[in-house]
Image (tube, rainbow, N blue to C red):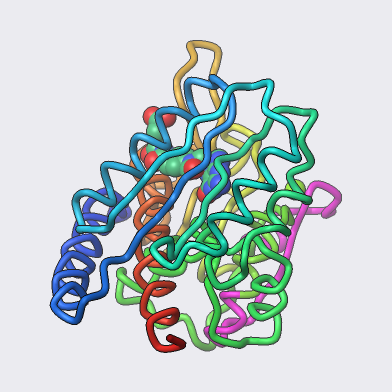
């Protein structure tokens, strides 16, 4: 039987509906979650993602603001803006859209965000809390991957999960989150020898290698849940994943498409983090 296609858009829609209800309840208690996004430069893709974030906020009732800065903005100016937002009680979440122009250190900027407002989950304190298993703001794409797997009804505990890719933004955090759900996790990467010998053992296969169509049916155990986090452009400029979709569809039990799989979950988990940050901050006041 061919795989069930995991439509991230549909899952994202139902999570947003749940969030909208939660936000309506918070507003009755006088809490309006607020997100501020900082966007530096003119990159069209970044502008499009930020529009998606504003639209998502509007959809669930989060107050959102976008601070647009031109590409000549200095690191000091950016740090000054972040300091002001850190101190503003109406701002529950702060997000700096990446990538930043090359004259600005992403590390310095992300480290300046108050960890309790770091709705991207990129601050070292939040990363550290995730590593030691403390409740914290989780990075959006990895969190979206876990939510997608859960919504298939798959029990993660006890399963063998194989993650391909060890980036700080996807591979490493996804591995940690799967481990936290009590999966047995194997991490593979560009230097792994005999990749199929590992991936063939996977009940859950998460592919975040950044190499178009590198995973075929010879890599996949029949019945596996396959999550494709790859974002690659083919020769025609079309968005394609790391997985050969048509081939793997014949052997997997669940498979995410690209586009329309993990991507739409990223912004939705950001909305979830903003609501969570607002609730946590309200408790502390
Ligand atoms: N501060 C951040 N910067 C960036 C992040 C991030 O999480 N935080 N991630 C990406 C961009 N991004 C959100 O910011 C993002 C990327 C992709 C999608 C998405 O829905 N993709 C769709 C396809 C859209 C298309 O056709 O281009 C999909 O995969 O189905 C949403 C958000 C880098 N910067
Ligand atoms: Mg890698």
Please say whether residue 204 is visible from this viewpoint: yes
Q: Residue furthest top?
A: 236
Residue 195 among magenta residues = yes
Q: How many marks?
A: 0
Across and down, in percent, residue 284 comes to 46, 87
Front-most of residues 270 and 156: 270
Front-most of residues 278 and 227: 278
Task: Indicate the quadrant containing the N terminus: top left, top right, bottom left or bottom right.
Answer: bottom left
Q: Residue at x 38, y 73 (%)?
A: 278
Across and down, in percent, residue 232 comes to 56, 30
With 79 as the anchor, is 90 left or right in this view? Answer: left
Q: Residue at x 39, y 74 (%)?
A: 276
Front-most of residues 26 and 99: 26
Residue 54, compared with residue 84, is above or below; it is: above
Across and down, in percent, residue 100 comes to 67, 34
Residue 66, compared with residue 160, is above or below; it is: above
Across and down, in percent, residue 34 comes to 35, 59
Residue 54 among magenta residues = no
Figure quadrant of residue 91: bottom left
Q: Residue at x 60, y 39 (%)?
A: 98
Q: Residue at x 50, y 49 (%)?
A: 228
Front-most of residues 84 and 244: 84
With 219 as the anchor, is 22 left or right in this view? Answer: left
Task: Indicate the quadrant containing the C terminus: top left, top right, bottom left or bottom right.
Answer: bottom left
Magenta stretch bounds: 177-199
Please say whether residue 1 is visible from this viewpoint: no
With 125 as the anchor, is 143 left or right in this view? Answer: left
């Amino acid at each position: 039987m061919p795989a069930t296609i995991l439509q991230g858009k549909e899952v994202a829609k139902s999570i947003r509906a749940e969030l909208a209800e939660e936000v309506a309840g918070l507003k009755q208690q006088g809490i309006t979650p607020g997100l501020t996004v900082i966007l530096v430069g003119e990159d069209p893709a970044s502008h499009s993602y930020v529009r998606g974030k504003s639209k998502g906020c509007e959809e669930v009732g989060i107050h959102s603001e976008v601070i647009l800065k031109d590409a000549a903005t200095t690191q000091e100016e950016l740090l000054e803006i972040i300091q002001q937002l850190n101190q503003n009680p109406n701002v529950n979440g702060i997000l700096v859209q990446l990538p930043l122009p090359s004259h600005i250190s992403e590390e310095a900027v992300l480290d300046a965000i108050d960890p309790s407002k770091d709705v991207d989950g990129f601050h070292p304190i939040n990363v550290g809390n995730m590593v030691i298993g403390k409740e914290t703001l989780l990075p959006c794409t990895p969190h979206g991957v876990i939510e997608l797997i859960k919504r298939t009804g798959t029990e993660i505990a006890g399963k063998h999960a194989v993650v391909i890719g060890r980036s700080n933004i996807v591979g490493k955090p996804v591995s940690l989150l799967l481990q936290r759900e009590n999966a047995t996790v194997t991490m593979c990467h560009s230097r792994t020898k005999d990749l199929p010998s590992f991936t063939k053992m996977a009940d859950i296969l998460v592919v975040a290698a950044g190499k178009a169509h590198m995973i075929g049916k010879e890599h996949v155990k029949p019945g596996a849940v396959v999550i494709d986090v790859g974002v690659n452009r083919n020769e025609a400029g079309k968005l394609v994943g790391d997985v050969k979709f048509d081939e793997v569809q014949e052997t997997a039990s669940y498979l995410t498409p690209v586009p329309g799989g993990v991507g739409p979950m990223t912004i939705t988990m950001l909305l979830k983090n903003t609501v969570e940050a607002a609730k946590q901050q309200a408790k502390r006041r």
